[in-house]
């Protein structure tokens, strides 16, 4: 999957006035894009670096040295999870050894839309049928609560296997872009590529109802 394909999955139907964040690790630089084509061009220009995109949209261009804080995020593409795998990069914690093992903690009735193999782990996305845009602070707070509840669900499931799982539910989170490269070990760069793709889309209410049933 190319960066264009991936960013289209996330943001093809976003509100025109909102900004996509493309963030590069080596220079810790934020790039703000109004459309997918601009975002893709930036990703392509930064192929020599570790490239990420925000899980949330920004209401404005915040410049090269700032990421949009969680309290200002204007919308989301869906839910997400960051799975670490047992490796030299994560040697001190109890972790699953493979991506299928990691994904075994995901409820069978809620399969991810797409899972990326990131080199030393995996990023899973449960994409909404269309980006969720917040019209008020209470709506944003409700979305933040839902993200935290979903991450708690996964963390409890991981604990049942004896595995660590970081509850990375902040709306300002950034995750890797498909079709780029993980350069954290410069001597051993690894591709960021699609592990699985179901294409399934969700509504926020699907997560709310599922978590209510679990009492989370």
Image: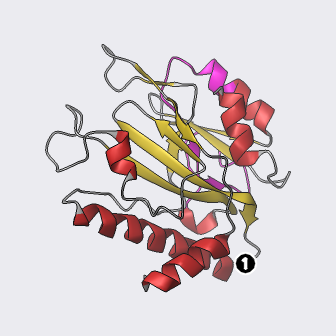
Q: Quadrant of residue 135?
A: bottom right
Would residue 114 be found to the left or right of residue 8 on screen? left
Would residue 132 be found to the left or right of residue 109 on screen? right
Q: Quadrant of the N terminus?
A: top right
Q: State the residue lying farthest toward the right.
A: 16
- Indicate whether 165 appears above or below 39: below
Q: Secondary structure at mark 1?
A: loop
Q: State the residue lying farthest toward the front.
A: 108
Residue at left offset 29%, top offset 61%: 158
- Indicate whether 187 appears above or below 54: above
Closer to us: 69 or 44: 44
Closer to us: 22 or 160: 160
Closer to us: 103 or 153: 103
Q: Quadrant of residue 100?
A: top left
Label 1: how many residues lie within 10 Å, few (<14), some (14-19) or many (20+)?
A: few
Does the magenta stretch mainly form a helix, a strand or a loop? loop
Residue at left offset 58%, top offset 22%: 46
**Residue 212 at x, y percent in the picture:** 51, 84
**Residue 193 at x, y percent in the picture:** 52, 29
**Residue 63 at x, y percent in the picture:** 64, 43
Residue at left offset 55%, top offset 64%: 70
Residue 193 visible, this angle? yes
The residue labelled by disc 1 is: 136
Q: Is residue 141 magenta?
A: no
Residue 141 visible, this angle? no
Q: Quadrant of residue 57?
A: bottom right
Would residue 211 be found to the left or right of residue 58 on screen? left
Q: How is the image coloured?
A: secondary structure
Q: Is residue 59 magenta?
A: yes
Q: Which residues are magenta?
A: 42-69
Would residue 89 be found to the left or right of residue 207 on screen? left
């Amino acid at each position: 999957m190319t960066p264009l394909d991936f960013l289209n999955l996330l943001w093809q139907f976003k509100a025109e006035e909102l900004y996509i964040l493309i963030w590069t690790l080596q220079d810790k630089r934020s790039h703000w894009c109004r459309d997918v084509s601009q975002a893709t061009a930036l990703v392509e220009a930064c192929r020599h670096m570790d490239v990420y995109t925000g899980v949330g949209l920004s209401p404005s261009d915040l410049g090269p040295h700032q990421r949009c804080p969680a309290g200002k995020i204007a919308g989301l593409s869906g839910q997400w999870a960051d799975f670490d795998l047992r490796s030299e990069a994560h040697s001190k914690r109890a972790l699953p050894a493979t991506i299928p093992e990691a994904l075994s903690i995901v409820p069978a009735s809620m399969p991810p839309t797409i899972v990326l193999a990131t080199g030393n782990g995996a990023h899973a996305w449960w994409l909404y049928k269309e980006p969720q845009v917040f019209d008020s602070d209470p709506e944003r707070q409700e979305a933040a609560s839902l993200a935290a509840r979903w991450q708690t669900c996964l963390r409890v499931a991981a604990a049942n296997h004896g595995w660590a799982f970081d509850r990375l539910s902040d709306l300002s989170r950034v995750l890797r872009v498909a079709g780029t490269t993980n350069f954290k070990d410069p001597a051993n760069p690894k591709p960021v590529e699609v592990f699985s793709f179901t294409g399934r889309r969700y509504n926020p209410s699907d997560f709310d109802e599922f978590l209510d049933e679990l009492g989370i």
